[in-house]
Image: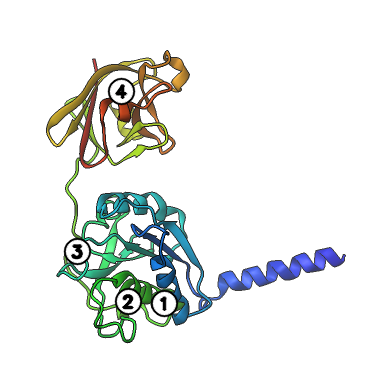
Amino acid sequence: MYRFLISLIILSLALQACNDKSAPKPIVMQTDFGLKDGAVSAMKGVAYTVDPRLSMFDLTHEIPAYNIWEAAYRLNQTVPYWPPETVFVSVVDPGVGTDRQSVVAETRNGHYIVTPDNGTLTLLADEIGIVSLRQIDESVNRRQGSSASYTFHGRDVYAYTAARLASGKIRFEQVGPELNRPVVKIPYQRAELKEGVLKGNIPVLDIQYGNIWSNIPDSLVQKAGFRIGDSLDVKILHVDSLVYQERILYANTFGEVAEGKPLGYLNSLLNFSVAINRGSLAEKKKIGSGAEWKIEVHKN
């Protein structure tokens, strides 16, 4: 009986927390800072100073230096799994201190992204949708005493603004003026089926094994009429230069081809991918990832 009452009390407190509209929203951070120094800790310290009740989480701080594209990919990969009103801070900012704009974007699903508008929002805009974009008014939403600093907006502007938004000290409308324009985008090959050929981008590698992941979804693979056991012709290009071309088997699992042989398959995100069984295709063929890498696939 005692344990049952304790369980009821815990459940009641949890429900109250869920229904408490004044409770701070989570903050999720990603940067290219790494964890070798105190930069990330400084950002969190600024946020906690705004409101010590805040819950802080890390998406990643291992984005390759200056790699805006990978920042865009990791946001798009992660944001959908967090509840609405979660506030994300993304700082991959090679243009810090220049005229690029500091913004907060509201996604169609109700998430907020605090970031420089330098291409980081590309994939969220295309895949989820952005319904509103506001420029951060630094006369209000900037850490006090930081106006002389031009190179650490992640601490002085983004973490501070995110904390004020997540804690409810400001509403989204108080971030700053609304920008009636699209977000800045990095050009890339969107997934499409054209005249029997599937075309797409290689947004990221399965880095542990060297497999090639594309942005071509299962729905387009089905629309192209690919079936397990089909023979497929694959081309991979960097910009417009052919890097890799081979005929491969479309399979469910790696074990359906001999060791060292190539195959096409659907990865854990249900996107078309290319690999070799027990080997690194990326390393063997010097294949990379990013906005400039493209893939084309068709049945032969």
Residue identifier under label 3: 95
Taking depth in this image into account, of 44 and 228 the one nearest to the observer is 44
For marks 1 and 4, the one nearer the N-term is: 1
Pointers 1 and 2 in contact (CB under 8 A)? yes
Question: First in sequence: mark 1 or mark 3?
Answer: 1
Dot 4 falls on a residue whose secondary structure is loop
Q: On the image, which quarter does residue 276 sit in?
A: top left
Q: Quadrant of residue 260?
A: top left
- If you read the primary sequence from the N terminus, does the residue marked by circle 1 or circle 2 appear first? 1
Q: Amino acid at mark 2?
A: Asp
Tell me the residue that label 1 is attached to: 46
The answer to which quarter of the image holds residue 264 is top left
Q: Is residue 134 above or below residue 108?
A: below
* Image location of residue 12, percent across then percent down: 69, 70
Tell me, for residue 225, which label it has, or none.
4
Image marks 2 and 3: residues in contact by CB distance under 8 Å: no
Q: Disc 2 designates what residue?
A: 156
Crowding near the residue tagged with mark 1, few <14, some 14–19, many ≥20 C-alpha atoms within 10 Å: many
- The colour scheme used to paint the residues is rainbow
